[in-house]
Image (cartoon, grey):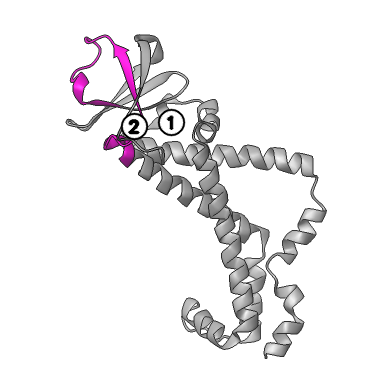
């Protein structure tokens, strides 16, 4: 069986479909459109989870350019997104190598994952074909990007709540505009609003930028960049 699979290696490799597809790509259009969608998806996902941690529905206060700027304002979002996609492709290739070199243990894994389905060549080839389909790969890439944005947003929100960021952002605001200034924490902003969160009352405050006199940035000696 191993020899038979080795003979079929070219057809089983999950990256063969990419090679053929990429040959037919119009790279200028593909990179521009793909990069645009990549940034939109990352920006929307990151902003949604980050501000949801502070009970803020960011969609009510944002425009499309705010989502596009989110990953650019925080480059680690892009880095983590690329790493997550790299992880996906790495796992796909490891699965391919596992099947070729350790077929016996792969069959056990296949039966467990497929809830007892027979690990014969027909079923495994069917699974390989599905794993190489553009729809499955696109869904996997979007899922990994979504999870990367989610976990990083939650991590950043916890750092902000516990005052572990490298810099403080102090806003000069009319005292009649908000209460409990000492318990308010700056959690972010977009093109039109500043977002504050009351760590005691667990309430969010949204302030239009034209109501803020100035913003002072102060280095936090106990803060961390990452």
Q: Do the residues labelled 2 and 1 touch (CB within 8 Å)?
A: no
Residue under label 1, please give it.
59
Asked if residue 164 lies in the magenta stretch, the reply is yes
- Helix, strand or loop at disc 2? loop
Q: Indicate the quadrant where residue 200 lies.
A: top left
173 w.r.t. 44: above or below? above
**Residue at x 66% of width, y 78% of height:** 125
Q: Give the residue displayed 62% in from the left and 59% down from the top.
A: 137
Identify the residue shown where x is 73% and y is 77%.
9
Front residue of 75 and 88: 75
Image quarter of residue 5: bottom right
Side (left or right) of 37 relative to 12: left
Q: How many marks?
A: 2
Residue range of the region highlighted in magenta in the rendering: 158-185
**Quarter of the rendering occupied by the C terminus:** top left
Q: Where is residue 166 in the image (x, y as percent from the top left)?
A: 37, 32
Compared to residue 123, the image places residue 159 above or below, namely: above
Give the residue pinned by disc 2.
56
- For the residue pair 3 and 62, the one nearer the viewer reads as 3
The CA distance from mark 2 to mark 1 is 9 Å
Indicate the position of residue 110 as horizontal and vertical percent values: 53, 80
């Amino acid at each position: 069986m191993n020899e038979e699979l080795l003979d079929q290696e070219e057809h089983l490799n999950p990256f063969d479909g990419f090679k053929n597809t990429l040959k037919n790509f119009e790279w200028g259009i593909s990179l521009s459109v793909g990069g645009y969608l990549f940034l939109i998806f990352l920006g929307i996902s990151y902003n949604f989870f980050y501000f949801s941690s502070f009970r803020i529905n960011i969609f009510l206060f944002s425009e499309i350019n705010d989502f596009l700027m989110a990953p650019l304002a925080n480059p680690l979002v892009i880095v983590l997104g690329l790493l997550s996609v790299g992880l996906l492709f790495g796992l796909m290739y490891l699965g391919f190598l596992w099947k070729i070199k350790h077929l016996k243990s792969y069959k056990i894994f296949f039966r467990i994952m497929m809830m007892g389905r027979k690990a014969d060549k027909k079923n495994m080839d069917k699974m390989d074909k599905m794993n190489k389909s553009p729809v499955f790969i696109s869904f996997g890439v979007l899922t990994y990007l979504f999870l990367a944005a989610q976990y990083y947003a939650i991590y950043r929100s916890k750092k902000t709540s516990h005052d572990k960021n490298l810099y403080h952002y102090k806003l000069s605001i009319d005292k009649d505009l908000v209460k409990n200034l000492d318990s308010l924490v700056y959690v972010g902003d977009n093109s039109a609003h500043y977002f504050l969160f009351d760590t005691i009352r667990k309430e969010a405050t949204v302030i239009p930028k034209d109501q803020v006199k100035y913003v002072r940035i102060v280095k936090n000696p106990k803060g961390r960049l990452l």
